[in-house]
Amino acid sequence: MSKIFSPGRINIIGEHTDYSYGYVMPMAINLGNYLEYVPYDKISLRSDAYNEEIELDLSMINKKQNKWIDYILGIYNALFELNLKPGGIKGRIYGNLPISSGLSSSASLELAILVALNNSYNLKLNKLQLALIGKKAENDFVGVPSGILDQFAVTFGKKGFAIFLDTETLSYEYIPFPKDISVIVYNTGVKRELAKTGYADRKKIVEDSLRILNKNSSKEIIEKDLEKLDPLYRKRMGYIIRENNRVINAKEALKKNNLELLGKLLIESHNDIAKNYEVSSKELDFIVETSMKYGALGARLTGAGFGGSAIILALRDKAEKIAESVHKEYIKVFEYKSFYNIVESNDGANIIEN
Ligand code: GLA
């Protein structure tokens, strides 16, 4: 029996910038999925989170089930398209990563399976190939038009570091994450599925804008170019070009250990995405505002928004107190089953027992 740990991720900054090939700065976290498995002649998996066991013949991989197993079938389809023909797998998936909460539970699941198949069937795929195959499964089979952020973070995560990534060239840099900062992930309790939100609408506006402006990446767009766009497009793209700049500034702030500047950039990012990209929610805004009231360094929504989670950065010795205070205030106002985790950075999807 082999065992894989595949993490979730937070995105420190650089939100909704990946599908216009801009900058992002995620970090893999120590919440994730474990997969215990043996090679098998069928796909036979149990998910504790869904409390369900599914067994399918390999001849069934292109039959969408509209269930969690689709992430796994998507991986098989993507591999078969590349003419890689792994055999089946039997195992159990469990862990502590909440689903539909903006922490990439789907990418975590995809990469857990990929790492297992890569290992057991000697597919010889490198990390970048793994991340791209994960994205392909999500885009083509599951039908979520996401960028590369999640799968890249889940694959390339490194304990002690955030990842600064140019999503156009896929060149990246590991940025040491200060040991004296804690990251609180506050889960609003409002679940969302990307396929059913305004994610695709946002993506369409961004793609149209790139076409109209004749640019390959949002990194090439300057403020003046925005004059050529209609008001709604200008508003959305204005956010994206400012966010790209903030990612670069946040990287520099981290390198200089300028925590005050880092916090300020997170707040700016949140306010800008709420006002001009309109993917925040009253719950997320409440968490950001309340955590600042209690002395956080900075906070913002993380992931796609529309519910899900916020991250709160705090000095390590203050984190627990801030998290508790935010939680107390939140449950006075909102009735969702909200909760928080204080997380650490983590390595990417990996075999932990072979
Ligand atoms: C989701 C998508 C990512 C990215 C974020 C927003 O997590 O899967 O590709 O677009 O939303 O930054």
Image (spheres, rainbow, N blue to C red):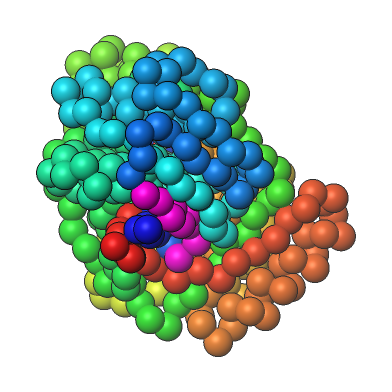
Residue shown at the point (59%, 83%) measured from the top left: 318
Residue shown at the point (29%, 48%) measured from the top left: 115
Left or right side of 27 for 117:
left
Quadrant of the displayed image that contains ligand 1: top left
Residue shown at the point (47%, 26%) measured from the top left: 56
Left or right side of 58 for 85:
left
Q: How many marks?
A: 0
The reply to whether residue 48 is in sight is yes
Magenta region: which residues? 30-38
Q: Look at the image and say whether residue 94 sits in the magenta stretch.
A: no
Query: Which of the 4 image quadrants contains residue 346?
Result: bottom left
Query: Which of the 4 image quadrants contains residue 340?
Result: bottom right
Which of the pair 71/307 is nearer the observer? 71
Q: In the orientation shown, which residue stands out farthest toward the front? A: 41
Q: Is residue 10 above or below residue 102?
A: below
Q: Main secondary structure of the magenta part?
A: strand
Which of the pair 271/177 is nearer the observer? 177
Q: Position of residue 284 (x, y in %)?
A: 65, 49
The C terminus: image quadrant: bottom left
Q: Position of residue 224 (x, y in %)?
A: 28, 28
The N terminus: image quadrant: bottom left
The reply to whether residue 218 is in sight is no
Which of the pair 295/143 is nearer the observer? 143
Q: Is residue 162 above or below residue 258?
A: above
Q: Position of residue 330 (x, y in %)?
A: 78, 59
Residue shown at the point (27%, 72%) measured from the top left: 176
Left or right side of 141 for 54:
right
Q: Position of residue 260 (x, y in %)?
A: 43, 73
